[in-house]
Amino acid sequence: MEKRVLKPGAMLAPAPAVMVSCGDMEKSNIITIAWTGIVNSNPPMTYISVRPERHSYEIIKNSGEFVINLTTKNLVFATDYCGVKSGRDIDKFEQMKLTKEKASKVSAPMIAESPINLECRVKDIIHLGSHDMFLAEIVAVNVSESIIDASGGIRFEKCALAAYAHGQYFALGAELGRFGYSVRKKTRGKSRRHPNKK
């Protein structure tokens, strides 16, 4: 496959376009973040990278808390809006008709319309250049009952989660496999032929 060499850039995709809520139940803001991810499993830790000039930066720095709200196909418009409008000028919860929901461990509100909310406490702030990274521990996870099955598992396919790739939003599609399926032993009695071969 022939490749073209481009200048260095933030080309890792897709990224999770999330709405990060901060502040408290009385005075709050929402910032859209694509630079986020998991950095450790035990304890569960995440990060968000924020430009220091953004309105939410000082709120998160001063409170040491935030909530990552996963976004869905139905929340993409609000996600985009919260990324281009400043909370200095407007109330994004009000403008986008989003509902504040009290979190269990942090003061920052959750977005009720989001199916999964991660409550986070900042452990460190790392200055990187254009952005500062807020390294945080996930202290609670809130999941909508509508996507939990009878065995207690989370049915992510029911969420219609959204992703971001270089300026564009996408809805995640069909499941292609599950972790470890490439090395899992075949069930006895079933054909070992490739599914496309007859």
Image (cartoon, helix red, strand yellow):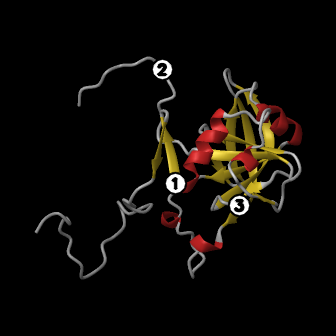
Task: State the mark number for residue 8.
Answer: 2
Give the residue type at disc 3. Ala
Q: Secondary structure at mark 3?
A: loop
Examine the rendered structure and indicate whether residue 9 appears above or below residue 104.
above
Q: Residues within 10 Å of mark 3 (few under 14, many from 20)?
A: some
Picture residue at 57% right of the left edge, 69% below the top: 154
Q: Which residue is mark 1?
A: 73
Give the CA separation, mark 1 to mark 3. 15 Å
Task: State the quadrant of the C terminus.
Answer: bottom left
Picture residue at 42% right of the left edge, 63% below the top: 178
Q: Residues within 10 Å of mark 2 (few under 14, many from 20)?
A: few
Extreme residue in the top direction: 7
Q: Residues within 10 Å of mark 1 (few under 14, many from 20)?
A: some
Q: Secondary structure at mark 1?
A: helix
- Callout in the foreground (1, 2): 1
Q: Is residue 37 visible?
A: no
Q: What is the quadrant of residue 135 in the picture? A: top right
Question: Is there CB contact under 8 Å for labels 2 and 3?
Answer: no
Give the CA separation, mark 1 to mark 2. 30 Å
Percent from the top left, x then y, of residue 52? 75, 26
Q: Secondary structure at mark 2?
A: loop
Front in this rendered view, residue 107 or 192:
107
Give the residue type at disc 1. Lys
Among the two numbered marks 1 and 2 on one chain, the one whose residue lies closer to the N terminus: 2
Task: State the mark number for residue 20.
Answer: none
Give the residue type at disc 2. Pro
Percent from the top left, x then y, of residue 47? 68, 41
Among the two numbered marks 2 and 3 on one chain, the one whose residue lies closer to the N terminus: 2
Among the two numbered marks 1 and 3 on one chain, the one whose residue lies closer to the N terminus: 1
Q: Is residue 104 left or right of residue 156?
A: right
Question: Is there CB contact under 8 Å for labels 1 and 3?
Answer: no
